[in-house]
Each structure stands twice: as structure tokens, then as C-alpha cells.
Image (cartoon, grey):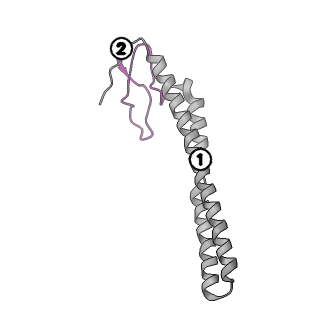
Amino acid sequence: MGVCAGITRAGGRCTVAVSGAQEFCHLHDPARADARQRAASKAARSKPKREIASLKAELRAVIDGVLDGSIERGVGSCAAQLYNVLLRAVEVERKVRESDELVVRLEVMEDALSSTEGRETRWRA
């Protein structure tokens, strides 16, 4: 049983054990580069922090407007309810994105596992 020939982001050698004719672990295997790239691309498109920050700023403006009298209480109340709907939609979107990312990660792990089936594998701690 050998060690992965890959290089980590820190510049050191990968320490993951590989078996048989494998040269790379699932994280460094060039054959799995597309799956890793898809997962990274989905993560890069994530924008919930900016969106939530924007919604919070807008909601604070409504609150301030209601408190200083520049926005009627009924209008402010309706706006707050609509902001709540937006926040729930952002949360649902985040959960869907997270679920999609987990599916990709599981597929990569299943591929790695299926490539080692039938061979003795020793996991290192």
C-alpha cells in the first residue's frame, strides 16, 4: 500500500493511503478533476451572505423609517412580512444548494470506494 503522489495546497505531500495500482487519492486523481471542479463551481456561486446582509440593511431602513415616522406603521408591517418571506426563500435556496453539493461529494466518495472494492483497504487515522 502506497501514499498518494499528490501535493496539498500547502505544498506538502498528501498523506492519504492508496492501494494497488492507484497513484492518487480521490482528492488528487486527475480522472476525478471534473467532479471536483463541478463541486467547487457550485460553491463559488454561493451568495447568501451578501444577499442576507442586503436584506438586513433594507429591513433596518424600514424599521428606522417606522420609528422616525417617515414610513407608516401599516406599510412598515407589510414590508417586514415581505422581507420575512424573502429570508425564508433565501434559506430554502441555501438548503437546496447545500443538498446539491452533498450529492456531488457523495458521488465522488462512491466513485473512490467503488475503485477500491475487492481490494484490501487499510484506513489510517
Q: Residue extending furthest bottom?
A: 69
Q: Is residue 120 above or below residue 54?
A: above
Identify the residue position indicated by label 2 in the image.
Answer: 120
Task: Look at the magenta stretch and give its main secondary structure.
Answer: loop
Q: Is residue 30 above or below residue 51?
A: above
Which label belongs to residue 44?
Answer: 1
Mark 1 or mark 2, which has the lower sequence index? 1
- Near mark 2 (Cα within 10 A), the count class, few <14, some 14-19 or many ≥20, is few
Residue 1 point in image, percent of width and height: 34, 17
Judging depth in this view, the residue of 85 and 113 nearest the camera is 85
Magenta range is 1-28
Residue 59 position in % (x across, y down) = 61, 72
Per the image, label 1 sits on a secondary structure element best described as helix
* Residue 27 part of the magenta-drawn span: yes
Q: Which type of secondary structure does the marked residue at label 2 adopt?
A: loop
Residue type beneath disc 1: Ala
- Residue drawn where x is 52% and y is 34% of the image: 105
